[in-house]
Amino acid sequence: MTGEALTESPDIQGLLFRGYKTLDHAAYGLFRIDDRRAFQTWLRRRVEREEIAPASQRQPEDAQAHRLNIAFTASGLETLLGSHWMPESFEPAFVEGMVRDHRSRLLGDVEANDPQHWRWGRTVDFDGLLIAFAPTRAEAEHLLAEHLCSANGASRVETLYGQRAKDGKEAFGFADGISQPVIEGTKRHRDRPEEARLHGVPAGEMILGYPDGSGRLPRSPATSAAADPAGHLVPHWEWPERRDLGRNGSYLVFRQLAQDTKGFWDYLSAAATEQGEGEDSAQALAEKMVGRRMNGTSMEPLPKSRSDENNLFDFINDEKGLYCPVGSHIRRSNPRATGTETAQKSLDVTLRHRILRRGRNYKDEARGEVGLQFLCFNASIARQFEFIQASWCNNQFFHGLQREVDPIIGTPRPAGNGLDSVDRYTIPRRPYRRLLAGLPSFVTVKGGGYFFMPAISALRCLAGAP
Ligand code: HEM
């Protein structure tokens, strides 16, 4: 299947290719399956009526329209598949779940981010996630209430809400949702060669069942042929006697991230010089932390021919980070190409660690909290999301830096147990760098989980599994 056909696929769930931008509100329902048979009947009906939106359903124009997408945890798939559940065919991170001691250390889920403080996800007492997109929050909530009920064999464990910011900005005030991977073979990939060079990835980096950046097919979850008596699935490429449950699906990472906007701007106002102007104003320092201007443009002035594009840059001409600091959020989460000698090589490496972000802002009036419902898709949680989080964002020695982590999403650490603090931020400058000290964490994890978003054909199999 070509990249273009994938984006219109009736088999891939829509959220992979569509942000549903015309639907302002999202409700994320974490649910438990209480009655497997009743749930399977419900799921079969939803799929038959095309109510679990495939990518082929275009962006809704109709104000009344809504969209549903569904994903499962390991326990959910185990419940539905019973003896046909083959955990060894899934990625270990997914089967283990987000909360394990070693994983928490890896992800920086320590200190204030320690799962013991989370509101949800600390123990995985849910089997799946139903996401409803609708024009209003009440409608999104209504959809969850209608579908996740005892008559359908499911009960809701937790509901989270998300909202599309009309101005496209996240809670600190920065333009968000700009840099995304571009799937090879799509129209966008064809029409924009420079963007394709910098951000192009084979479909298999995001969707299972297609070659990834190594040229091989990514590992894909399997089930037995007996689990699929109606033959919805194709034979598994690795184990031909089994069926490919993963094809056209993707792993979904969900993290609820609270943003301390007051703390962020208070810290920056205090760090701003007395005049509070120019490169030492609070805004300029914040932009150096994120690695983009607040309006989304790149830190490095781009040639006139590219000035209307905000993602056509690498860091080849900015090796020392004089424009975009080496430790900034966007540079840590996608280091692009650096070093003229090794430019292509570093680009090739970073392209194997891209994620497709589908998050939305949230505002919890009752708690007086704002933040990001961070959602991303990848073909491998370990190689993509976890690698970014652990090896880049929370790596205190990233690119020769010391004692600092990502200033937006890293987990800083106070001194203790004979170890130095990890709480600095370096802004390279001539003749002297500007060093910010004593950074607190501005983003706190409130919950999270790993899910698998199956293809529509895999949902049919799950609904009919004996
Ligand atoms: C509340 C938490 C977060 C905030 C406020 C935030 C903010 C931003 C902003 C403002 C941008 C630049 C605009 C854009 O390209 O979309 C960005 C880019 C990005 N962020 Fe985050 N982010 C957060 C969490 C995360 C997490 C948890 C990850 C993954 C581990 C992540 C990965 C990325 C990536 C991959 C990019 C694109 C980098 C590039 O290609 O230039 N972000 N983020």
Image: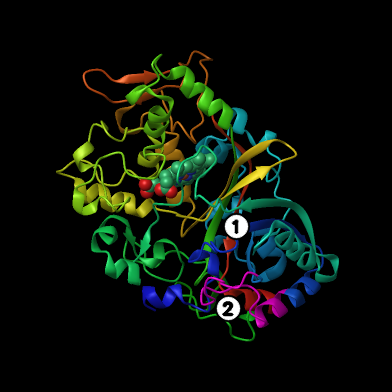
Mark yes or no: residue 426 visible: yes
- 334 to the left or right of 365: left
- 412 to the left or right of 41: left
Mark 1 or mark 2: name the one nearer the start of the chain.
1
Instruction: Report the residue marked by disc 1.
Output: 451
Residue farthest to the right, as pictured: 151
Marking on residue 457: 2
The location of residue 11, given as percent across then percent down, is 53, 77
Q: Determine whether the residue tagged by mark 2 lies in a helix, strand or loop.
A: helix
Q: Is residue 51 magenta?
A: yes
Q: Determine whether the residue tagged by mark 1 lies in a helix, strand or loop.
A: strand
Camera-nearest residue between 192 and 15: 192
In magenta, the rendered stretch is 43-63
- Mark 2 neighbour class, 10 Å CA radius: few under 14, some 14 to 19, many 20 or more: many
Q: Is residue 427 magenta?
A: no
* Tag 2: amino acid: Ser
